[in-house]
Amino acid sequence: MAIEHAMVDYGIILGLLGVASGAASLIYSRSQVVAARRQAEQATRATLLESNREISVRLQQIRSRFFKVPGIGDELKNSRPEIQEVVDSVGGDVYGFFRDVIDTFEDIFVLRRSRIVTDEHWRVWTGSQMGVYAGLPRFQSVFKLAKQEGFLDPEFVKFFEPLLEGRPVRDPMVRSGDTNSTRLPRLRIARSK
């Protein structure tokens, strides 16, 4: 009887070890599925980023040639006088340049919101790039037109508008109203010199 009891105990122990091993295998399998899903999401994100970059480059090339097309100014004046008015006030090359800058800023905003742009790069963009351009009157004219015409993501507009007034911006990666504390002091120092 003692031998049977010992064999039953070993059977229970081995059975429990089998259950534990199976549970560990399930947990491991689940973690592998999660890791594979993350890798697939990262690959998709990388592909989308590359596609967006290529499209942005093509758009900039097209925009740089836009005002060189014979008669385009007259067509624009007849069909979209509000755009032509801003183009006339800032110049075609300046308009194209500032639209490229705005598109780049919008891309940076979207990438930051998607958690792709690092803190260091974000501080550089908001501290030494976006704020400087936002203070330029011709840039402001082009930005306001792009906003009015609906050329920009409304979330980007909401994010960027404080810069036009010299106020700090909210980091789109931070849900609360946290701001980028590195931006204003550097620009105030530069402006006071």
Image (cartoon, rainbow, N blue to C red):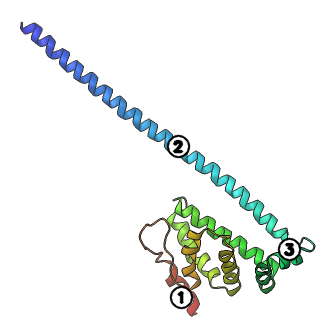
In the picture, the quarter occupied by the C terminus is bottom right
What residue is rendered at 63% in x and 64% in y? 107
**164 relative position to 9: left or right:** right
Camera-nearest residue between 6 and 177: 177
Q: Label 3: few (<14), some or many (≥20) within 10 Å?
A: some
In the drawing, does residue 1 fall left or right of residue 140?
A: left
First of labels 1, 2 by sequence position: 2
Instruction: Tell me if residue 146 comes above or below residue 53 in the rendering.
Output: below
Alpha-carbon span between mark 3 and mark 2: 44 Å
Q: Left or right: where does residue 27 sit relative to residue 36?
A: left
Comes first in the chain, label 3 or label 2: 2
Q: Residue furthest bottom?
A: 193
Cα–Cα span, label 3 and label 1:
38 Å
Q: Residue at x 80, y 68 (%)?
A: 63
Q: Read off the residue under disc 3.
A: 67
Residue lying at 72% horizontally and 56% vertically, measured from the top left: 54
Q: Which quadrant of the figure has residue 92?
A: bottom right
Mark 3 / mark 1, whichever is N-terminal: 3
Query: Is residue 77 toward the left or the right of residue 167 in the image?
Result: right
